[in-house]
Amino acid sequence: MATVVRMQQAGSPDVLKIEQATVGAPGPGEVRIRHAAIGCNFADTYFRSGYYPVQPPCGIGVEGAGTIEAVGEGVSGFAVGDRVSYNGGPLGAYATERVMPAAPLFKLPDSVSFEAAAASTMRG
């Protein structure tokens, strides 16, 4: 089970709820990532408040870094155990692990920490 932050509706910070969720296997073009760090950006407040429209219920957060745990069919250039980071949708980075498209991922060299990557890809 993964710990995730989700919202059922747009609004103030109290709409964000911590939940437990099953994270399945990645589908074609997807990977499953175990996050080591996530970015917290001012834009997240826009999603949460409804200023940037989203369709709740949904997760929140668009920036993270971690290790690939599973790779779906058709994904090339990434393997289980790769250190990766990303910025961009879909929402859902506020989670201990998630399944997401492989397209926005990039590999992290060992010299770049998960924390530095997750904190800098939006503005870096």
Image: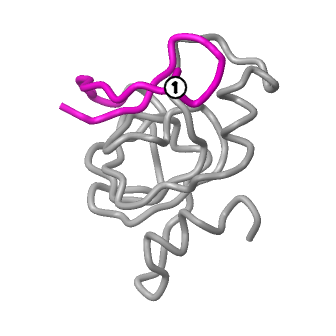
Disc 1 marks a residue whose amino acid type is Asp
For residue 24, which quarter of the picture?
top left
Q: Quick one: SS at disc 1?
A: helix
For residue 44, which quarter of the picture?
top right
Q: Position of residue 50 (x, y in %)?
A: 74, 20
Q: Where is residue 12 in the image (x, y as percent from the top left)?
A: 63, 25
- Position of 82 relative to 50 (above/below): below
| Magenta-tinted stretch | 1-26
Q: Residue at x 43, y 70 (%)?
A: 114
Given residues 120 and 18, the one toward you in this image is 18
Given residues 67 and 28, the one toward you in this image is 67
Q: Which residue is outermost to the left? A: 1
**Residue 45 showing in the rendered view:** yes
Q: Position of residue 21 (x, y in %)?
A: 26, 23
Q: Quadrant of the N terminus?
A: top left
Q: Quadrant of the C terminus?
A: bottom right
Q: Residue at x 72, y 48 (%)?
A: 42
Which class describes the residues within 10 Å of circle 1: few (<14), some (14-19), or many (20+)? few
**Residue 24 showing in the rendered view:** no
User: Does 50 sit left or right of 59 as displayed?
Assistant: right
- Position of 61 relative to 55 (above/below): below
Q: Which residue is outermost to the right? A: 51
Is residue 9 rendered magenta in the image? yes
User: Does 95 sit left or right of 106 as displayed?
Assistant: left
Q: Residue at x 35, y 60 (%)?
A: 36
How many numbered tags mark residues here?
1
Is residue 55 rendered magenta in the image? no
User: Does 34 sit left or right of 11 as displayed?
Assistant: left
Q: Mark 1 points at which residue?
A: 14
